[in-house]
Amino acid sequence: MTIKPLADRVLIKPATAEEKTQGGIIIPDSAKEKPLKGEVLAVGKGTKDEEMVLKVGDQVLYGKYAGTEIEVEGEKLMIMKQSDVLATL
């Protein structure tokens, strides 16, 4: 399945959550925090008021409550407006 975001939306693959702390303690699934960075997989064309500045392959940071989580072929992805992205890495 191919997903093509519309207007000023982007499709992001979140980075994997940390499995261990720096001290080597294993973090259980229930205590893992949702990652706040990821890779842009697809972008919309933008709107007449907002030009699309992100591109496929960009590494980005986004807000904790940004976007909507979707599952495609068993893979969890995020779709959100470009304005919910805080920065590129």
Image: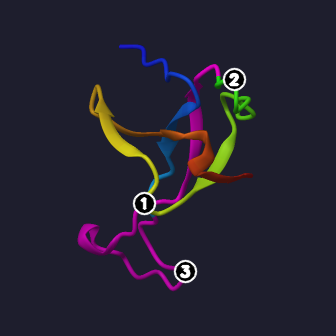
Assess whether mark 2 and mark 1 are in contact (beta carbons under 8 angstroms). Answer: no
| CA–CA distance in space, label 3 to label 2 | 46 Å
Q: What residue type is labelled 3?
A: Gln
Marking on residue 48: 2
Q: Which residue is drawn at 51% across and 38% down?
A: 12
User: Which mark is nearer the camera, 3 or 2?
Assistant: 2
Please indicate whether residue 34 sits to the left or right of residue 6 in the image.
left
Question: Which quadrant would residue 73 be assigned to in this image?
Answer: top left
Question: Which quadrant would residue 33 be assigned to in this image?
Answer: bottom left
Label located before the other in sequence (3 or 1)? 3
Label located before the other in sequence (3 or 2)? 3
Q: Which residue is drawn at 70% across and 34% down?
A: 54
| CA–CA distance in space, label 1 to label 2 | 26 Å
* Residue 39 lies within the magenta run: yes
Q: What residue type is labelled 1?
A: Tyr
Q: Name the residue under label 3.
A: 22
Q: Residue at x 67, y 32 (%)?
A: 57
Q: What kind of secondary structure does the magenta stretch mostly adopt? A: loop
Residue that lies at the very extreme toward the top in this rendered image: 1
Vertical side of 17 occupied by 7: above or below: above
User: Which mark is nearer the camera, 1 or 2?
Assistant: 2
Tag 3's secondary structure? Answer: loop
Instruction: Tell me the crowding category of disc 1: few under 14, some 14 to 19, or many 20 or more residues within 10 angstroms, Cα based.
Output: few
Q: Give the range drawn in magenta.
A: 18-45
Tag 1's secondary structure? Answer: loop
Of residues 80 and 1, the one drawn nearer to the viewer in this rendering: 80
Vertical side of 66 occupied by 82: above or below: above
Of residues 71 and 21, the one drawn nearer to the viewer in this rendering: 71
Q: Mark 1 points at which residue?
A: 65
Q: What residue type is labelled 2?
A: Lys
